[in-house]
Image (cartoon, rainbow, N blue to C red):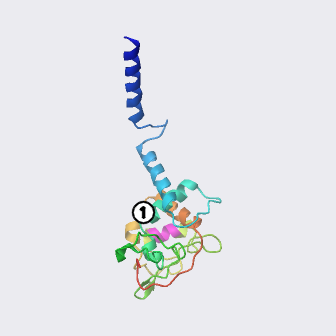
C-alpha cells in the first residue's frame, strides 16, 4: 500500500472514530443522559445556587426536574414570570421570576400554595427529607396529617423514584429563601 493511500485510510478511520459516541469506562447511556440533565439543570436554574454541603449532581438533577419537567414555579412562584416575560401573554420568553421563586402565595380558591424555599434552618418548607418524602408519597402535610393536599399533584409525583425525590429536595435546599409576591392565579 503506498504512503498516500495509507494516510487516506488513516484519516478516514480517524474521522469515523471521531463521530462515534464516546463512552468512558463504566459509563452507559443512562449515566450520559443523567449528566446532560444535570448540566441543563444548572443552565436553567433561575436563582443563585448554594452548593455548600450539597451533592452538586443532585442539585443539578433537582433543578432539571423542578424547572424543566415539573414546572413547580407555576404553582409555587407568585408571580411565576418576571414582568414582561409571561409566554402566555404572547410576547414573553418565559423568564422565571427569581425574586419570589418558589415562595408560594398562589391562590387556588381557599388554598394558597406553600413557600417551599428553605427556612432559617435550611429545610425546604421547614421539612426534613423524611417529612418531604412522606408528603410527596402520601399527600399528607406533616403539620396537618389528617388532611390531604388537594392542589399539589402528589398522586403523580409519588411515582417518582427515591433518587429523583431526593434530587428535588436537595435542589430546594440549595436555593435562596424568598417571600411570596402578589398574583391572582397560577402561571401569571
The question of residue 174 being in magenta is answered with no
- Residue 89 falls left or right of residue 176: left
The answer to which image quadrant residue 14 occupies is top left
Residue 15 higher or lower than 183, as above or below? above
Dot 1: what SS? Answer: helix
- Residue lying at 50% horizontally and 61% vertically, measured from the top left: 62
Q: Which residues are magenta?
A: 132-136
Which residue is the site of mark 1?
68
Q: Nearer the viewer, residue 55 or 134?
A: 55
- Residue lying at 49% horizontally and 62% vertically, measured from the top left: 63
Image coordinates for residue 179, horizontal then vertical, percent: 56, 79
Furthest-front residue in this view = 4
The answer to whether any part of residue 140 appears in the image is no
The answer to whether any part of residue 157 appears in the image is yes
Q: Quadrant of the C terminus?
A: bottom left
Residue 187 higher or lower than 111, as above or below? above
Most prominent secondary structure in the magenta stretch?
A: helix
* Residues packed near mark 1 inside 10 Å, few (<14), some (14 to 19) or many (20 plus): some
- Residue lying at 40% horizontally and 87% vertically, measured from the top left: 109
Amino acid at each position: 500500500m503506498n504512503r498516500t493511500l495509507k494516510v487516506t485510510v488513516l484519516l478516514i478511520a480517524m474521522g469515523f472514530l471521531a463521530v462515534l459516541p464516546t463512552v468512558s469506562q463504566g459509563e452507559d447511556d443512562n449515566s450520559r443522559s443523567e449528566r446532560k440533565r444535570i448540566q441543563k439543570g444548572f443552565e436553567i436554574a433561575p436563582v443563585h445556587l448554594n452548593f455548600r454541603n450539597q451533592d452538586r449532581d443532585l442539585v443539578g438533577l433537582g433543578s432539571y426536574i423542578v424547572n424543566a419537567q415539573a414546572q413547580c414555579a407555576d404553582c409555587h412562584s407568585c408571580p411565576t414570570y418576571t414582568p414582561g416575560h409571561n409566554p402566555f401573554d404572547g410576547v414573553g420568553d418565559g423568564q422565571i421570576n427569581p425574586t419570589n421563586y418558589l415562595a408560594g402565595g398562589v391562590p387556588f380558591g381557599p388554598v394558597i400554595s406553600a413557600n417551599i424555599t428553605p427556612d432559617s434552618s435550611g429545610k425546604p418548607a421547614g421539612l426534613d427529607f423524611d417529612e418531604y418524602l412522606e408528603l410527596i408519597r402520601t399527600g399528607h402535610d406533616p403539620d396537618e396529617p389528617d388532611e390531604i393536599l388537594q392542589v399539589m399533584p402528589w398522586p403523580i409525583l409519588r411515582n417518582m423514584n427515591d433518587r429523583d425525590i431526593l434530587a428535588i429536595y436537595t435542589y430546594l435546599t440549595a436555593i435562596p429563601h424568598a417571600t411570596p409576591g402578589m398574583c391572582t392565579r397560577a402561571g401569571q
